[in-house]
Amino acid sequence: MKIIKPIIMNNNERIYQILQEELSKSDVTSMINSKLSSSLNSKDFEKKVKEISSEVINNLFKILWQRNTFWKNSVK
């Protein structure tokens, strides 16, 4: 029976191999920056941020409405 390694193990092994190749700090930094940049510019990321922001604002208004007696008196 063949045991399948999780993807995380493969990524850790790859990171270890990269570090063993003695990449310079600037090389590693550029690799990290390019990966972050590509993920931050993706449409999926933008969609998820909008979804989370919407939920947060919705929950904020719900809480403010439910506890309006708590903050209303202090505002007046």
Image (cartoon, rainbow, N blue to C red):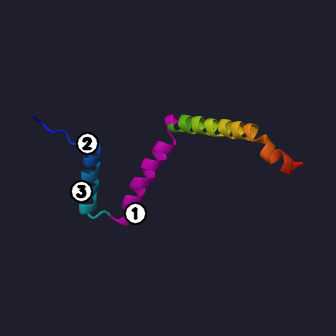
Q: Main secondary structure of the magenta part?
A: helix
Q: Residue at x 15, y 39 (%)?
A: 3
Observer-nearest of 12 and 27: 12
Q: Which residue is mark 1?
A: 26
Q: Dividing the picture into quarters, in which one does residue 59 lie?
A: top right
Cα distance between the residues tagged 1 and 3:
17 Å
Q: Amino acid at mark 3?
A: Gln
How far apart marks 3 and 2 lie (CA) works out to 17 Å
Instruction: Find residue 48 and report its horizontal and vertical position in percent.
Output: 54, 36
Residue 67 image point, x, y percent: 74, 41
Q: Secondary structure at mark 2?
A: loop
Q: Amino acid at mark 2?
A: Pro
**Which residue is at 84% across, 51% downward?**
74
Q: Which residues are magenta?
A: 24-44
- Select label 3 or label 2 by which is in front: 2
Name which of mark 3 and mark 2 comes first in the sequence.
2
Position of residue 50 in the picture relative to residue 63 (left or right): left
In space, the residues marked 2 and 1 are separated at their CA atoms by: 29 Å
Q: Is residue 24 left or right of residue 65?
A: left
Q: Is residue 21 among what the camera can see?
A: no
Q: Answer with the quarter of the image where residue 29 lies.
A: bottom left
Does the magenta run of residues contain 35? yes
Disc 3: which residue: 17
Magenta stretch: includes residue 54: no
**Amino acid type, mark 1:** Ser
The numbered dot on residue 6 is 2
Mark 1 Cα shell of 10 Å, populated few (<14), some (14-19), many (≥20)? few
